[in-house]
C-alpha cells in the first residue's frame, strides 16, 4: 500500500464467501453525515452494522477500516451485472460528504486526488472492469443517491478509472422521451439496454417506478445535468454509446 493511511478497525466485517481473487467491483459512496468523525464512529459501531474498506476525508486523509480480503458491509441489498449481494465481490470506499440530506457539496480536489491514487492501487490488485466502477446509487437505485450528481465521474475516467461517454457536448435529442406510464417495444428495448449495461430491472415494456429509479441512477452517473428519471433521446443515446464503447473495449 503506497498511499499513507490511518488504521480505523471496525468489528463490522466478516469473511467473504469466496476467495479475495473473486473481487471485481469497486463501489463509491458518500458518508451522508455531518462530519468525518461522526461517519467513522458510525462505521465501527456494531449496533449499526455498516462499514467500508476505506474512507477518505475531504482533506485527502485515508482511513482503512476493513482489510480488502474481508467483506465490508457497505452495499446492502444490491445488484450489478446479474449479481446480487455486491458486498461479496466488491471493495467499498466512503467519501466524506454531508450528502443530499445535510448540505450536499462538490468533492474537494484533495479528496479526489486521494481517491484516484487509492483506486489505481485497488485496480492494480484486482481485475475490475471499467463498467464495474460504480456508485452506490447504481447498485441500489431504489434506496440510494450517492455519490450523486456532483461527483466527478468524468475526472476519474480521464485518469483511467471507470467509464465515461466520449465527447463533452449533449447528444442530439432526436427521440421522444420515455417516462412513467409509457409502454411498448421502445420501453422494452431501453430496459434491455439498461439491463445489459448492468442495472437491475425487469424488462417488461412498462415504464413504471422501477424504470424511473434506474434511469435517475444512470443520470446521476452519466448525465448529471439532468436527473429526472425521464429517458429522453439524449439519455438513451448516452446509454447506447456506452454499450458500444464497452463492448469494443471488452
Image: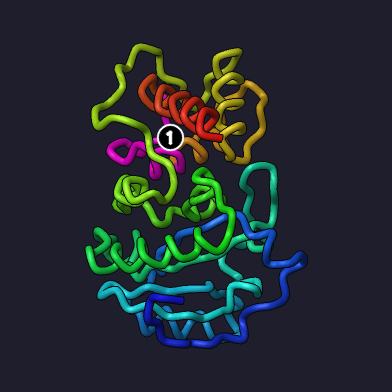
Q: Is residue 23 left or right of residue 174?
A: right
Element marked by disc 1? loop
Q: Is residue 231 left or right of residue 13?
A: left
Viewer-closest of 189 and 179: 189
**Circle 1 sits on which residue?**
229
Viewer-closest of 90 and 200: 90
Q: Position of residue 155 (x, y in %)?
A: 29, 49
Q: Position of residue 178 (x, y in %)?
A: 46, 21
Image position of 147 with respect to 204: above or below: below
Viewer-closest of 16 and 204: 16
The quarter of the picture where residue 115 lies is bottom left
The quarter of the picture where residue 209 lies is top right
Image position of 208 with respect to 51: above or below: above
Identified at 34% across, 59% down, the residue is 100
Rendered-image quadrant of the C terminus = top right
Magenta span includes 230: yes
Main SS, magenta residues: loop
Amino acid at each position: 500500500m503506497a498511499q499513507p493511511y490511518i488504521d480505523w478497525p471496525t468489528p463490522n466485517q466478516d469473511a467473504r464467501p469466496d476467495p479475495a481473487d473473486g473481487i471485481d467491483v469497486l463501489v463509491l459512496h458518500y458518508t451522508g453525515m455531518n462530519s468525518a468523525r461522526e461517519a467513522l464512529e458510525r462505521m465501527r459501531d456494531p449496533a449499526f452494522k455498516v462499514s467500508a474498506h476505506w474512507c477518505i476525508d475531504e482533506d485527502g486523509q485515508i482511513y482503512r477500516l476493513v482489510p480488502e480480503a474481508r467483506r465490508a458491509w457497505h452495499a446492502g441489498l444490491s445488484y450489478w451485472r446479474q449479481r446480487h449481494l455486491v458486498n461479496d465481490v466488491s471493495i467499498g470506499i466512503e467519501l466524506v460528504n454531508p450528502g443530499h440530506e445535510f448540505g450536499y457539496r462538490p468533492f474537494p480536489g484533495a479528496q479526489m486526488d486521494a481517491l484516484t491514487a487509492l483506486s489505481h492501487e485497488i485496480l492494480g490488485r484486482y481485475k475490475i472492469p471499467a463498467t464495474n466502477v460504480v456508485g452506490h446509487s447504481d447498485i441500489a437505485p431504489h434506496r440510494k443517491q450517492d455519490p450523486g450528481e456532483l461527483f466527478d465521474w468524468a475526472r476519474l475516467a480521464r485518469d483511467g478509472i471507470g467509464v465515461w461517454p466520449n465527447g463533452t457536448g449533449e447528444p442530439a435529442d432526436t427521440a421522444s422521451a420515455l417516462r412513467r406510464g409509457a409502454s411498448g417495444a421502445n420501453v422494452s428495448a431501453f430496459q434491455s439496454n439498461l439491463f445489459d449495461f448492468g442495472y437491475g430491472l425487469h424488462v417488461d415494456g412498462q415504464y413504471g417506478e422501477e424504470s424511473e429509479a434506474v434511469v435517475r441512477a444512470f443520470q446521476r452517473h452519466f448525465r448529471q445535468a439532468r436527473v429526472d428519471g425521464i429517458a429522453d433521446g439524449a439519455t438513451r443515446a448516452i446509454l447506447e454509446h456506452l454499450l458500444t464503447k464497452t463492448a469494443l473495449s471488452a
